[in-house]
Image: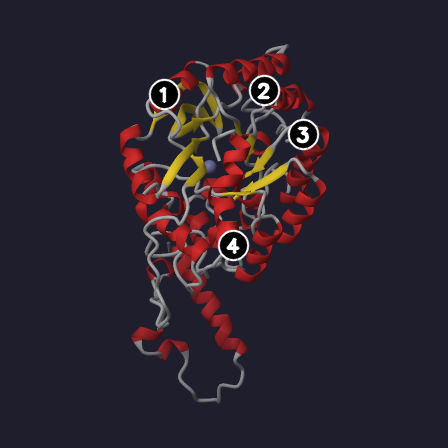
Amino acid sequence: MDVSRRQWLEGLGAGVLAGAAAPLGSPTRAEAAPEEKGIPLKDFEPRSMLHVPETRVPKARFPVIDVHSHLTETTHGDKGVAVGEEVSVWIAAKDALAVMDRKNVQAMVNLTGGHGAGLQKSLAAFDRAAPGRFLTCTEPSYEKFLEAKYPQIQADAIEAAAKAGARGLKILKTLGLYLREQITAGPLIKVDDPRFDPMWEACAAARLPVFIHVADPEAFFLPIDRFNERYDELGFHPDWSFHGRDFPSFQEILAARDRVYARHPKTQFVSLHVGHDAENLAAVGASMDRFPNMTVELGARIGELGRQPRTSRRFFEKYQDRIFFGTDAVPPPEGEKYPQQVFKDELYEIYYRFLETEDEYFDYAPAAVPPQGRWRIYGLGLPEPILKKVYHDNAARLLGLPS
Ligand SMILES: [Zn+2]
């Protein structure tokens, strides 16, 4: 934290120097009153003095399908790559259902359901425990990547997972940012590596949508310095930085992703986190215009959407049939580490407030300090027909649920 304090003070110093209009003989910084000397950035929690309407939205106006949650996760990993079939269950189905019922969430898609025996465990814990309320996805078995017939093994595993009850395939940013030629060593594997072509095709054949997350916020690819708008967040999670070393650039990852979309037009790609580029809705829209098989989801990005409410509103109007509601919810206690994703009532209320109201300048996460960047958001006040599609109808169509 000393670093942030020093950098904050340096920033303050630059501001004083820039203000060259200060007359000679005026007090210098060293003489300033104690309360003017600054506080560590981590202790700065300004309260808004705006007097504007604050609307509580305890229940969504229409039943919700949350297409992005993590109720289970592969237990073991090595350098960012999941290892083995064992999965951990983060919450009991009955406890998740209690939140869902209070918040009008009809169904949740559990993306990280694992594979093999792990997938079976996830399906038993959720899909079979409460039929219709949970839909679980499978994941690639990267630990088999070095086997000679891996491309076919992976394609066959998709078919088997679909037969077992999986409702989609989840791709974590492992692909492109962690998986390497020797799994955890050697050059990084590119998102469009042809060894995964049979897997994408198997998803189309089994009618499993691919929930894909590659890249990350643009700021994660930049130095962690005083110009980085996600300075606090990267301070808490330095492992989320993909700046330097041998990482591809943000643009290289998205270009590789686009080549996958182009090569597999029959495969449905749900591009999580608003196409992994919520800061640049023009670019997301351009990709959606190019690729009819591309849709997007909102998880953990209302902080981005809500600080550009007019651009976002136009985006929702134009692509209203191709946007899914999602939160990226992770149950506590794990989820408490990422307040913008913590699976609890408050999180859903913020999403509903953002989508349904025209409230101004409110927190995008249940946290004392905005966790993804120090700004607040503005509601979109979406009309009912768009709300109904985004909350429910688009996902029901994607997943083959009753509309
Ligand atoms: Zn996620």
* Residue 243 makes an appearance in the image: no
Query: Mark 3 or mark 4, which is nearer to you?
Result: 4
Tell me the SS state at disc 4: helix
Q: Nearer the viewer, residue 20 or 46?
A: 46
Residue 199, placed above or below residue 378: above
Residue 128's tag is 1
Separation of marks 2 and 3 at Cα, in angstroms: 20 Å
Separation of marks 2 and 1 at Cα, in angstroms: 20 Å
Q: Which residue is mark 4?
A: 305
Label 1 packing within 10 angstroms: few (<14), some (14-19), many (20+): some
Tell me the SS state at disc 1: loop
Q: Which residue is mark 2?
A: 206
- Percent across and percent down for residue 144 are 55, 15
Q: Is mark 1 within 8 Å of ligand 1?
A: no
Which quadrant of the figure has residue 123? Answer: top left
Residue depicted at 43% across the width and 39% down the height: 66
Tell me the SS state at disc 2: loop
Mark 4 or mark 2, which is nearer the start of the sequence? 2
Residue depicted at 42% across the width and 57% down the height: 4
Image-based side of 99 in relation to 4, left or right: left
